[in-house]
Every structure is written in structure tokens, then in C-alpha cells.
Amino acid sequence: MPPLITNRYRFLIRISAFLLKEMLEILRQPLLLLTLVIGPFLILLFFGIGYRNEARALRTIFVIEDNDSAVSQKLDEYANTLGPQLIFEGKTDNLAAAQEMLRQGEVDLVAKLPTDIYNTILNNKQAVFNLYHNEIDPFQIDYINVFGRVYINEVNRRVLRLLTTEGQIDLSQAQETIDAARDSADTLQELLQSCAETLSEAGRGEECNSQTATEYMQDLNEKFDDLNRIVEEDLSFQESLQREFGEGSDTHEETDDAESLQRIRDRIKSLETAVDDIDKYEAQLETLTNLDADLAGLEDQLKDFLNINPSILVSPFRSEVESISTVQFKVNDFFAPAVIVLLLQHLILTFAALSMVRERQLGSMELFYVAPLSALETLIGKYISYLILGAILAAILLSVIVFGLNVPLLGSWLNIALVVLAVLFSSLGIGFIISLISRTDTQAVQYSMIVLLTSVFFSGFLLGLNTLWEPVRVISWSLPATYGILLLRDIMLRGGGLNWPIFAPLLVFGVVLFGLAWWLLRRSMQNI
């Protein structure tokens, strides 16, 4: 065989040897292979199964000053039927007590109903529903704004259906019809005045066009028929509005409108066909003068309703969203506590995960075994060392975001320190467990990265826990970062204290992990 071909075969053989070696090396570490391939896949699988893109239901308490008003009765009737995203938690007349419930997390939203709705609408203004929340998540704040608009639109739709039909709210025609009736009355008055003057001067009525006067009277009757229909619709609307939202009795205004309408009807009926009698013309002229005054009075009585903007009638309510917090937050402020917790967990967990692996590689485990040193003492010493290191890192990070980035810190530094120490304590437990089950530092690093990836998806760092299916939240509550993020956000951004229903399980979780790490270390030292 020629030397050139032989050299090529040898070249390929040498390359294939490395290929085979690396493949066997990977196959000899099935746990690492599973970690690299199946680990990320399982994380994405559980996240896909657990993620719920559903609108959050808000526990809402309503504040209304008068529990005996018509609005309060309507609230009892419709509150539970507005939609599934509104959970009716009752009503109260004490705004301060409702806001305290909001601070304590007993409700998610406080809705204060407007007062004097009837007169507000008459004054051509929308009545305002004030929605109070205690959210710090910018996405949840946006959701509450949308929530308010959607449900106020539903309230407006129902109110519109209750008050009137489409024809009944077209009050803009009333002004035009009154003007047209007054014009007809004025024209007829001028004509009759001309006839009266003709009869007075000539002593006869041939020059007076009685037929034209009769036609104008018929036209005035037609205008009154239109006016009568529209005014009756207006009276019906006033009655509905007063019934639904009135807090007092204004029925005398409706009675005045009806009486004015009846007087106008009687005056028009008293107008007769023009005759050649000056006395008759003068009586009709007086009737027309009074009729014009009655129309002007009716216009004044209806002006409140005639001036209402049609958009107010269609949408009498609007919502205004307010936070009970005294500080305005930015998006960076919301994510800053979560970033600190996630960084501290990952750094301390990785340091602890590499700790025992290095001890085995350096042969220190054998020295620990022959020395008068127990597994408990070894573990406690390492815990204290890394807790001090983590505390220093936490102090640096907190100083940077509070004094450098001006992230609000409304709570106590002591509470923050306790939460940080609890997160570090629990994270060390996971790190030492990883270290004691890993054979190489590569495995330890891979396991640490899996925990980090899991924390990003399931700890509430990116998405709130309410977006996850409840069975999948078990993964969330197995991560120290979940507890730390909730606690640190509440202390820093809301000024709250230690939330023991969350803080206590974090401590218990850390103690359980410490016990498991101690058992694994003792077994490892005994097997040397």
C-alpha cells in the first residue's frame, strides 16, 4: 500500500480513537447525561403544563356610604353576576377598614362607589368608581386598570338597559322640537295679529287669510304631538334615573314638567279656527302669548336633561385606579428584590455544591474521617463560613440597589437581614446535598444550573405564582427563592413586616435540608 494512503488511514484511526473515547466517557456518566438532556426538558414540560394564561379573579370589597340606598340594593342584586373575575367579598361603609383589609391581604381590591350619582349625571359628569389596590407588580397593576374598564363597561351596559331604550335617550330632539313649536306659535301670532289689525281698520275680514291661520294651527298641533312624545320620554327617563340612583325625592320637578305639558295641551286646544271677529283674534293672541311663555318655562325645566352629553347617558360611570402605597414604583424596583434573591441563592448554592466535591478530590475527606471531627461539626463549620460570605455579598448587593439605583426600601433592615439569612441557610442545604451526590465538579455545576433554571421559571421571578397550576406550584415551594422573593418584595416595596406564614416554612425547609445534608455527609464519611 502506498505510504500516502497508509498515512491517511492512520490519521483517521487516530481521530476515531478520540471520538470513541469521548462517547464512552459520556455513556459512563448517565446521571450527567440525564441532567443535561432530561433536566431542561422536564423544566420546560412542567412549566408548559402548569402555566395558566387565565385572568386573575380579584377578591373585591365594596365601600358604600348609605347601605339603604337604591345603589346599595342594586349592588346586592348584581355584584355576583358581573363576571367570574370579580369575587364579591361584601360591602362596608368604612373605607379605612376596607383599606386595612387590603394591606393585610384579605382582599385584592377595594371598590368605592360614587356618592350622589343622580346629581352628578345631571351636572353632565361621569360618576367615578375608585378602585384601590396594593399591587407592586407592574403587570398586575395594568391588569387591574383593564379589569376596572371592563367591569365599568359592563355596569354601564346594564344601567343603560335598565334606564331607557335607544329612543328614550335621544333627548337632543327635545330642544329642536321646542324651538320648532315656539317658531310655529310666533308665526301664528304674527298672522293673527295682522288679521286683528285688518279687522280693526277695515271692519271686515276679507283681507285676512283665515285658511293660512288654520294651516298654522294644524302645524302647531303636529309640533305639539312631537313635543308631547319627547317630553313624556324625558319624564320617563327622569323617573328611571331617580329610581335607580336618586338619594332624595325630586318628584316635584317631574310634576312641574307634567303640569306645564298639560297647560300647553289645553292652550292649543283652545285655539279655534280663525273667524271674522276681532275679539276672537285678541283672545287667541293672548293664548299664544301664554303658550310661548309656557314653552319657555318647559324648556327651562328640562334644561338639566337637555344639556346632558349623550356620552354621559351611554357611559354614566368610569373607574379610577389608585394604589394605597405612598410610593410610585418603576419596573426596575419590582424586579430588584427578586434579582438579589436569585443571585444569592445561585452563588451560595454553587459554592456549597463545589465544596464537598473539592474536598474529595483533594483527599480532605479522609483527613476529616481520621480526625476527631464529626460530620455535624464539619457541616456547621461550612454553613457558618458560607453564611458569612453570603451575608457580605447580600450587603453589597442591597447597598448597590438601594443607594445606587434608588430602589425604595420601606421596611426594616432587620427584617431584610432575617429573610436573607433564611434564604442563604436553605440554599446551602440544597448546595451541600448536590455536592454530596455529585462525583465531579462538572456534575455539581450542572445541578446548580438546573436549580437556577428551575428558579427562573417557577419562583415568581418572571411570572406570578397565580399564573401556575396549583399542583405545579409544589416545585415553586421547593425553592428558597420563592419564599425570599415574596418576603423581600413585601418588606422593601410595601413596608410590611415578616410574613410568618411564608417565613416559618422557609426556616423549616432549611432545617430539613440541613438534616438531610448531615445524614448524607455522615454516611459519606463512614464509607471512606
Image (cartoon, rainbow, N blue to C red):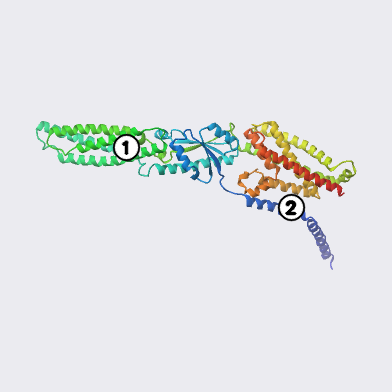
Q: Nearer the viewer, residue 76 or 109?
A: 76
Q: Amino acid at mark 2?
A: Thr
Q: Residues within 10 Å of mark 2 (few under 14, many from 20)?
A: some
Q: Is residue 349 visible?
A: no
Q: Which mark is residue 175?
A: 1
Quadrant holding the N terminus: bottom right
Residue type highlighted by circle 1: Gln
For the question of whether residue 355 can be seen, the reply is yes
SS state under label 2: helix
Looking at marks 1 and 2 on the same chain, the residue that comes earlier in the sequence is marked by 2
List the residue tagged with mark 2: 35
Q: Name the residue located 19 percent from the left edge and 41 percent from the top edge.
A: 215
Q: Position of residue 363 (x, y in %)?
A: 87, 46
- Asked if labels 2 and 1 touch by Cβ distance under 8 angstroms, the answer is no
Q: Give 374 or 188, whichever is nearer the viewer.
A: 374
On the picture, is 256 further left or further right than 246? left
Left or right, residue 386 beside residue 203: right
Q: Quadrant of residue 230?
A: top left
Q: CA distance from mark 1 to mark 2?
A: 79 Å
Residue farthest front in this picture: 68
Q: Residue 93 location, x and y as percent? A: 50, 33
